[in-house]
Structures are given as structure tokens and as C-alpha cells.
Image: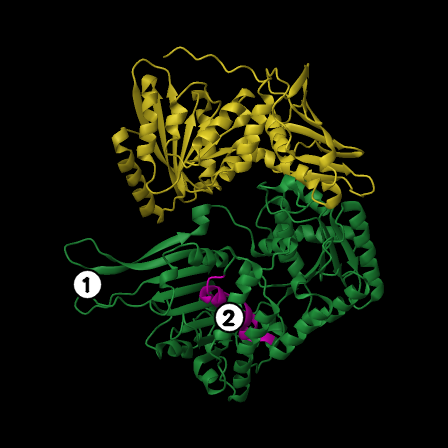
Chain colours: A yellow, B green
Amino acid sequence: MSVPLDRVERELAKLWDESARAAGTSRASLLTLVALVSEPGLLERAQAAVAEVVQTRPCRTIVAVWRPGDTPSLGAEVALHRGHDGGPVCGDAITLEATGAAREWLPGNAERLALPDLPVCVWWVGDLPDHDDLFDRMVVGADLVVVNSGEMDLRDLTKLSSIAERSRGRYAVADLTWIRLRAVQDMVARFFDDAEGRACISGLTRVTIEFRSPPGDEDAASTQAGLLFGWMASVLGLPDDGVSWKRGSGWAEARLGRLTARFEAKPRADVRPGAITRVALESGEARFEIERQDDPLVFRWSRQVPGVASPPQALRVHATEEPALLARCLERSKRDLLLETSLRTASRIVRSVAPRLSVVPPPR
Amino acid sequence: MDNPFRVGLETERAPAPCAFVIFGASGDLARRKLLPALYNLAVSRLLPPGFSIVGFAVTEMSEDQFRASMREGVAQFSRRKPIDEAVWNDFASRLHYVSGAFDDEANFARLRAKLDEIDANNGTRENRLYYLAIPPSLFPKVNDQLARAGLVADPSDASRYTRIIVEKPFGRDLASGDALNADLHRVFHERQIFRIDHYLGKETVQNLVALRFGNAIFEPIWNRNHIDHVQITVAEDIGVEGRGKFYEEAGTTRDIVQNHLLQLLMVMAMEPPVAFAADEVRDEKVKVLRALKPLVGEDALRDTVRGQYGPGNFVGRPVPGYREEPNVSPASHVETFVAMRLELDNWRFAGVPIYIRAGKRLTKRITEISVHFKDVPHALLREDGAHVEPDVLAIRIQPDEGIALRFVAKVPGPTMTLRPVAMDFKYGSTFGGSGPEAYERLILDAMLGDPTLFARADEVSAAWRFITPIHEAWASAPVPTFPSYAAGTWGPPEASDLIARDGRAWRRI
């Protein structure tokens, strides 16, 4: 239902009231989730994702989008989120549509419409624009900022790292791609859970990360692969300055002290662009490998450490759809220091191969 | 040295690879609860790689038949439907079966061979979790055979573990409970023993801990200065459902009060532990049992009521009385209902009566703890002598898990008319979907070696120390006139008298 901006709360209250009379709805809210949609084409996806998240994380959702236009205007639509199959109301939904210069009004209005006394999560949907202060203005009052580095390119790792640093603890930064990486990180960590595995860590000399090539990518490294290696390099304490790179068609190799990291793009249609397909590590005679199987949700985990029997395992991972990742992000309220460290390390490692930051655009 | 790749890594709770052996795998518990719980852990990706299940039972069947039977159980009783074929196929490939008597050494040699094979193929590294889904009378046989077959690791061996999960009943009185503990301790160290009480795995019971110790507003008023009394109800609307033989031996006091109900009491009344860790929590729980004012002799007869259901109706259809149930004596004096007035002799709850009731074939199925606060000290807003209802905080354990707060509000209008209103928080409608079943949580905890939500030996012993004198008092009293309540009611009238004696009434639930 379209409503004037100053009637948003009143109309929502009316909808809650009607629903309560019909079904005895009581209200419980955990937070306000603000989805800032960076381009109109992503609006539907954002709305679907928040509608799914609200099923298990009751909250107010504010989806904000802007379109070009000469006359600045800001309109609002309100509705209630209902449980699947006509279940009880689980939250209220506000959509803000800005036209032209009214885009600048979004931060103030989103803040005004946030539920009192509850955390605010700002989810930036899509790529992060360069040199745009809307993001900074949106996150001023946020407790949690969610991005998706998988929708960005390598240079954005630096940008994300500086965003995390700039937050100075005022808000936590979460990354949907980082959450998606957890299963891979867990499988890598499993190599070293026992003493025999841990003994190989200091001798690691080579890491190979294969991934589905992002379309149009020229760097032979996805942000996901970069972030994964950033994590490994920070765990291993590898030097992240003075990294030397060799590059070829569809591959790149970085030399960090004693270790060589190879990134290689592989054709694979049934996983997301940038998704990890294989990780292999070498330490002397020992070999460690996880490889995505024909079933894209199954990895083969194998380890060959001389003198130790480690039968290979087929490990099934969760399908990690956007709403599930977003819901996982909302579970945490404190800074993810491991993500921040991994971002910082990854951004330093890829600095010399990531495209230059784009030039400052002319003022609009 | 710790694994540096685990530092700061937020992964799900990931247990080490292990083999899970179910003794009594062809029984109802395995089919209805254990396999569905394990399957759901697999769906949630919480089982470790290489995890394997070995069913052990007397019933002869092949591994394929065992898998088929377990699949039926999962299809029928899992909270997630329909079965995810990809997950099931992987899960089923990890199901094995060994048949044979529990006292035959050769069968345990076969079990050992099977476990060795699993260790070699699946990397389970001699980590073993045994689940005794068998009658307690068989525990000693299984324990002895496990020890004889070399299937029990030394608890100090950090490279592998052996744990055993034991189902209630943990004995039938103080002597048999202690004997059972002693028998387990012959083979296992206490830290290897996980006594399961599925009530502790319920989300709401854990949330009671969160409510009390995660909020600043409740703990300051959680004491004798503000609480008038507490009621705990564990009511079932069903009868003994084919468990007549068991019930004739147990009765409601042994079946419900000694374990589930006292667990709820302990969590409601315990002092804040210094940490949410196994021994710290269980130390505080045991102190509650030790503070229970003993009910001995005349005190027991005065402050307890037992009853037995007669014929009645359940949702509009006639149902038989307890004595007409299969495998029940027509002259049985076993109680199917019990109510008690308890007191805790400690600083926090001294003088606060705790009324408990539990029974079968009651009006509805509900488990609830209600904390009834004292009247306001001065009836400022009393209207023509009308009584202002005191506040009640109700923690509903099942069904519709949630928390309700009843407080007084002004009715809109020109007069100061006050009425109690209920503010109801329901987990299901708030968080959507279904949370993990109690068995899922508890089995995962056992795999992780976390006994916080399991009963410790001294806890079981302390519970029997309180319950046994009550049974002794009942045994010395005249035979009660049973049946004493009709099926479908809230128990015998004496239960209402017990609480009315103090000028109070059971909460309408």
C-alpha cells in the first residue's frame, strides 16, 4: 500500500491492529533491517531475501532504492510480513523509493523509521560504489553493516578493509561471502586438528586455490579466493608486503616469503561465479586437498601425511542462499576480528594486481 | 599446541569424528527419537565427517533391513519432512548393524571388529559414544562386555574418547539408584557418563537460564521478598499408552517427579553459577535438591497427594481407567497423579511454597512453571475492595514453548478499572520454524563432551534421597481409595485442597 511518508507509522499500526483483531497477533522484534539497494534491478532480490529472513528473525524491514529522475521525490509503501503458508505476522515492511536527488534523503528517513531501542542492521545490496558518501551516511547509526564482497572485485577488498577500520567499533561489519566461506575454512582447519597435521603447518610451501572464474574478470582471482587466502596468510603469519606476482591467462601466482599461492580460474557452470572449487596445500611430502565434486554441495576432503592413515571423506555443505547467509550475519552483534584481519591481509596481498581505483567521478 | 586455523573461526559446534553405538537399536526409542535426531543433525551439517552409527540389538536383521527400518522411523518421526534423499543416502551409508545377545562375548568381539573397520575406513580414531537404549537390568551386562572387549578407553587418554549415554530410570529408589551409579563407575569414570533427561534439552528450559541470568530485571525479584509461591505442572492428557507393565513398576513419582520435574525445579531455583559450565551448573542444581525440606512420615502424608485415573473421556470419546489398561493389575494402587507442597530451606526461597503436580489423563497436555509474585504492598488502586490480581510469570515448556507475563492494566474509560492482561511470547511464532529437538541438542553435547545438560551421579542420588522417604511413607499408610479422579480432569479433589489449605489455587492453564 502506498502511503505518504509522514503516515508510515500510522498505517503500519493500523495493519498490525487489523491483524491482531483477526488472529491475535503479538509483536516481537529483534531489530530493524535496512536493505539499501544499489541498483533498481536488485530490488526484487532484496525484497525476497528480507521477506525470507523475517520468518526466523522477526523485525522491521526497510528496503530503500533509488531511480534517476529530474524531480526529487521519496515515496513509501507499507505492508506486513506474514509467515509461510499464511502464518502469523512476523514483521512489517517498508519500501522507500527515491527519485533523483531525493536519494540524499534516504539516510535520514530510514533512521526516522527504525524501531526504537533496537539494533539497526544496514545491508548494502550489490556492488559498493566508489566515492559515494551515501554508504557512509547510511551506516552512521547502524550496529551492523552487511556487504557481499562476492559481488565486488578485488580492489573492493581494500575498500571493505578501510570501512571495517573506519568503523572503530561503532558498528560491526559482516560479509555474506565470508559466511559462505566458513564451510571451506572449516574443511581447511580440519587438516590440522590433530598433532600430525599441525606438525605440517610450519612446512607449508604451496597453496593452490581454484574457483569459478567471475565473468569478465581479468585478475585470475575472485574476491572469495582472495579473502580465503587472506585468512590463511594471516593465520600463517606470512609477510603481506613485497608480494611478487606472476600472471598468466586464467591464473596468477603470488610469492610470500616461503610460500607460493596459486589462484586458478576453472570453468564450472553449476556454482556461483567466484566460488571455490578446490584448495590444495603442500608441506614437504604431505598433501592436503578439498575438491568440489559433481554434486556441487559435496567436497572430497583428503589428506596424505606420511605415516598417518587419513581416509578421504565426502563432506556435504549447506546450500548457502542469500537469505540464510543474511540470517547468519544477523546472529552476531560484535565485530568479527578474524574477518577484519583477513580483509586487511587480503587487500595488501592483492594491492598490486587489483585494478587501480577508478578516478573520482565528476560531481552530479 | 592448538590448531591456529581454528582460532577465531566461527564454525558450527563441530565434534570430532566418532562411532555412535546404540544398544537396543531395534527398539522404539531408536526409531522414534535417536535416529530422527541423528538424521536432523546430519541435515543441519552438525555431524562430524566419518561419523558412523552401529546398531546393536538381539533382533536378527541385516544391515539393509536395519537401514530400511530406521528410514521408516525417520520418515515418520523426524521434525523435517520429507526426507532429504541426498542427506539420507549419505547418512544411510554410515549405518551398520550387529545382532546378538548382550551377554555373549563373541557378539562384542564382532562389535569390536566392526568398530575397528569403521576406524580404519572413516577416521573415527577410536572415539566411541555408546547409547544404552535398553532396560537398566541389562546395563551391567553391557558394561562388563564393553570392558572385556577392550572397548572402553581410559578417560585420561587424550587421543580418543569413550562416552556412554544412559536413559532413565536411574534406579527406583535411593539404594537401587546408588547401585546403578556404582555399577557404571566400575567401568566408566563419571566424566564419561551422560545421564540423559530430555527435559534439559528443551529450548525453553535452557531459556529459563537465559531469562533468569541474561536479564537484569528478573534476578533482583527472584526471591522470597517478591515471590509468593511457585507452581510447576507436568500434565499429560494421554494414559499409559501400552506402557502398563512399566508404569506398574514406576508410577508418576518415579516416572516424572524424580527426574523431569525436579530438573525443572532445580533450574528455576538454583543460584547463579559462576560459569555456564558443567560442574558449575550442576553444583548449583544439587544444592537446590539438598535444600529441599525432606518429606518424611506424617509430613509426607500431609504435603503430598496421589491419585489414579478412572474411566472418563478424552476429546469427546470414552477412555478406560488405569486399572483397565493392558498389563495393569485390576486392583493396582500405583499412582498416575501426584501433587506435592515443597519448601526449600535456603536463603532465597525460605517460606516460599512450591506446588508441583504431574499426572496422566489430565485435562490437557502442558508443562509449565509459573512464578506468582506477591500482592502490591498497598492497594492504592483497589476498587470497592476488589482484589487486584498479582503478577504471574509463566514459563511454558510444552507445547507452544514460550513465556507469558500477567500484569495489571487499566481498562480504557473514565474509571480506574484494573484488569489482568497477559503478554504472551511464543517461540514458534516469533522465531518461526521448528527448533532442534531435545535429543538433537543432547546427543550433540555428548559428542562434544559437554555434560552441562546431563544429570550427575550426586544429582540423581540427591533426587532419590528426597523421593524415597515419600514412597516409604505411602507404603506405611492405609491403601488409598483408587481410582480417585476421572480421566480428562485435573486430578483428585485433594490436589485442590492441598493448595487451598494455604489460601491459594492452581493456576488455570
In three-dimensional space, the C-alpha distance between marks 2 and 1, rounded to whole angstroms, equals 41 Å
Residue occupied by mark 1: B381
Element type where label 1 sits in the image? loop
User: Which residues make up the magenta segment?
Assistant: B250-273
Q: Chain of mark 1?
A: B
Mark 2 surroundings within 10 Å by alpha-carbon count, few (fewer than 14), some (14 through 19), many (20 or more)? some
Q: Chain of mark 2?
A: B
Earlier in the chain: of badge 2 and badge 1, it is: 2
Whether B219 is drawn above or below A285: the answer is: below
B261 in magenta = yes
Give the amino acid at mark 2: Lys
- Return the mark for residue A313: none
Rendering coords of residue A115 (x, y %): 34, 39
Task: Look at discs 2 and 1 and give the one toward the viewer.
Answer: 2
Side (left or right) of A343 relative to A186: left
Whether B313 is drawn above or below A190: the answer is: below
